[in-house]
Image (cartoon, rainbow, N blue to C red):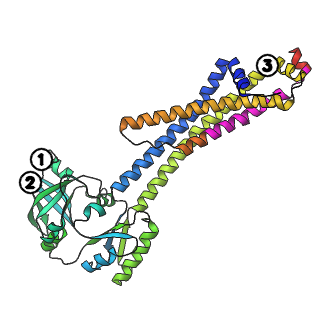
């Protein structure tokens, strides 16, 4: 006896209502897994993107026991394997005065590489230039928050600001306004002081009377910016300075790994919870097929009397069970991907379809159809043809 696709569909259509409910039950389970996996995929993508924007590949070399950092160190650190660029940093807790507003802030002395190394993004005006550093210019780039809290708007390029540095107030011209909360420095110092001001490091050295640097910022190789590189660089910079652990390196990459792991665990846990509904759907499929066996007992007897083998009967019901779960799985996956895609489109987010999770859900669902459809199929195959014809 030949078991075909059309025959299986015809058998499914014989119980339209019951088959539709079974397909819907399976679809709901796959839909839930797809949506949860889609949310996790988009969330992970956005977190990773935000981290890149925050300077995920940047690191800070800091002195823990008074080791002096000099121009020679900046050049030497910049030549290390795994480092693309190095930039001197000066740092000071400060107070800013704009109009009648006084706000606590953190002043950073940087150079023209700040855009790449610590990911400063100018929303108005420009950033600190090489010429500013050479001329020891009294210019600055301020945090967007400082601008809005004092003037009520973000674009205040050309205005003056007074900064408290080394015990006195110094006036600077604002040449740019930087996007707030997204720089590598802010990510590393989150929750300490959110509002930053950037000035040429040479100007800060003049004011503080220092010829050394407080820190050195490194731009790491994006493909290898992991904890092992941080450990290797820490050892190398200490060797260069001949200091026994006097220099430490803070790398935001380790935080990325932790966040990615947490997101992965949460997504997997929620997907497993949603996957329980697939098992419930399998039980529904088994119930549906048992009812179908009862309704088609006489038909099974006729087929056996004309030569159908037990394996033929078993395959007929097993194929029907698998097809029910297959149709439901495809419908649920398609609807789930559509909902995720539409949600991302509304929120203006790029959508990355979690195809691996979807394929796993489809495979698991179809496997459940085969497992839970096996008992009804065997029951149908074992029917005695004479007793089945009497039914």
How would you rate the neighbour count of disc 2 (Cα within 10 Å): few for under 14, some for 14-19, many for 20 or more? some
In screen coordinates, is 143 left or right of 257? Answer: left
Mark 1 or mark 3, earlier in chain: 1
**Circle 1 sits on which residue?**
151
Give how far across and how far down residue 31 sits, in percent. 54, 34
Q: How many marks?
A: 3
Mark 2–mark 1 CB contact (< 8 Å): yes
How would you rate the neighbour count of disc 1 (Cα within 10 Å): few for under 14, some for 14-19, many for 20 or more? some
- Report if residue 70 is visible in the image: no
Task: Look at the magenta stretch and give its main secondary structure.
Answer: helix
Residue shown at the point (22%, 55%) measured from the top left? 195
Residue shown at the point (43%, 74%) measured from the top left? 232
Position of 106 relative to 360 (above/below) = below
**Circle 3 sits on which residue?**
296
Nearer to the camera, 115 or 291:
115
**Circle 2 sits on which residue?**
159
In screen coordinates, is 73 left or right of 148? Answer: right
Residue shown at the point (42%, 34%) measured from the top left? 342
Q: Secondary structure at mark 3?
A: loop
Nearer to the camera, 84 or 372:
84
Give how far across and how far down residue 337 sits, in percent. 50, 36
**Magenta highlight range:** 362-385
| Tag in front: 2 or 1 | 2
- Residue 121 is tagged as none
Q: Secondary structure at mark 1?
A: helix
Extreme-right residue of the structure: 386
Extreme-top residue of the structure: 390
């Amino acid at each position: 006896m030949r078991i075909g696709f059309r025959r299986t569909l015809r058998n499914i259509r014989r119980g339209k209502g019951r088959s539709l409910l079974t397909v819907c039950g399976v679809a709901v389970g796959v839909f839930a897994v797809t949506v949860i996996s889609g949310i996790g995929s988009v969330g992970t993508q956005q977190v990773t993107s935000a981290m890149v924007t925050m300077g995920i590949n940047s690191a800070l070399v800091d002195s823990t026991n008074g080791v002096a950092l000099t121009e020679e160190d900046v050049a030497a650190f910049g030549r290390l394997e795994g480092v693309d660029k190095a930039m001197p940093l000066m740092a000071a807790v400060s107070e800013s005065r704009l109009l009648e507003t006084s706000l606590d802030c953190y002043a950073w002395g940087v150079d023209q590489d700040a855009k790449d190394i610590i990911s400063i993004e100018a929303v108005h005006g420009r950033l600190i230039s090489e010429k500013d550093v050479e001329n020891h210019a009294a210019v600055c780039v301020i945090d967007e928050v400082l601008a809005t809290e004092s003037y009520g708007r973000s674009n205040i390029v050309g205005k003056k600001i007074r900064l408290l540095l080394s015990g006195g107030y110094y006036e600077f011209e604002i040449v740019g306004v930087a996007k707030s909360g997204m720089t590598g420095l802010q990510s590393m110092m989150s929750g300490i002081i959110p509002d930053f001001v950037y000035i040429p490091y040479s100007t800060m050295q003049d004011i503080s009377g220092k010829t050394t640097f407080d820190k050195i910022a490194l731009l790491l190789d994006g493909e290898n910016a992991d904890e092992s590189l941080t450990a290797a660089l820490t050892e190398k910079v200490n060797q260069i300075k001949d200091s026994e652990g006097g220099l430490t390196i803070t790398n935001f990459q380790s935080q990325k790994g932790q966040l990615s792991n947490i997101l992965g665990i949460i997504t997997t846990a929620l997907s497993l919870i949603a996957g329980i509904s697939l098992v419930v759907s399998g039980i529904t499929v088994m119930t549906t097929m048992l009812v179908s066996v009862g309704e088609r007992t006489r038909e099974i007897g006729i087929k056996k009397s004309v030569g159908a083998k037990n394996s033929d009967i078993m395959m007929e019901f097993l194929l029907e069970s698998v097809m029910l779960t297959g149709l439901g799985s495809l419908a649920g996956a398609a609807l789930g991907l559509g909902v995720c895609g539409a949600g991302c489109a509304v929120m203006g987010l790029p959508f990355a379809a979690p195809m691996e999770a979807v394929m796993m859900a489809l495979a698991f669902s179809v496997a459940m159809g085969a497992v839970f459809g096996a008992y009804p199929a065997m029951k149908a195959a074992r029917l005695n043809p004479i007793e089945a014809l009497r039914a």
